[in-house]
Amino acid sequence: MAVAVASLADLAARLEKKIGNAASTSAISTRLILRTGINLRQPRPEHANDPAVVEKLRAALADMGYAL
């Protein structure tokens, strides 16, 4: 069972650890903005710890091939 992701900062850290490349992480973040309208690197305060937003981005990443 996967460990729950509590915040967008946690999700961003896990993605960067998995990818290991800041440039690629930036490109993926841009794709997430286009796909969901949510900025992973500089989220709005109301998005940062919202479980629904975190799950939406986690699911979008999984759809893109980055299951976390």
Image (cartoon, grey):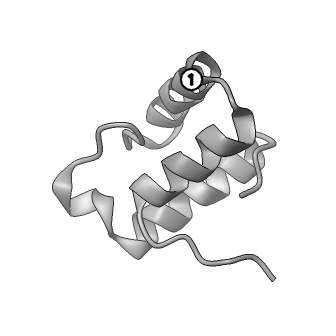
The correct choice, above or below, for 54 with respect to 3 in the image is above
Please state which amino acid type lies under the numbered disc 1: Ala
Task: Locate residue 36 relative to residue 19 in the image: left or right.
Answer: left
Who is closer to the viewer here, 27 or 18?
18
Left or right, 13 with reference to 46: right
Q: Is residue 35 above or below residue 7?
A: above
The picture quadrant where one finds residue 47 is bottom left
The residue at which mark 1 appears reads as 22
Q: Where is residue 63 shown, x and y percent of the image?
A: 75, 48
Residue beneath the point at 49% across and 25% down? 30
**Residue 15: x and y, percent?**
63, 44
* Local secondary structure at mark 1: helix
Q: Quadrant of the N terminus?
A: bottom right
As displayed, is residue 49 above or below residue 39?
Answer: below
**Residue at horizontal 73 percent and vertical 43 percent from the top:** 18
Whole-percent x, y for residue 67 in the image: 77, 54
Q: Neighbour class for label 1 at 10 Å: few (<14), some, many (≥20)?
A: few
| In the image, farthest residue toward the left | 45
Find the residue positioned furthest to the top: 23
Where is residue 39 shown, x and y percent of the image? 37, 39
Q: Residue at x 58, y 16 (%)?
A: 23
Point out the image quarter for the C terminus: bottom right
Residue found 42% across the figure and 74% down from its top = 51
Most extreme residue toward the bottom, as rendered? 1
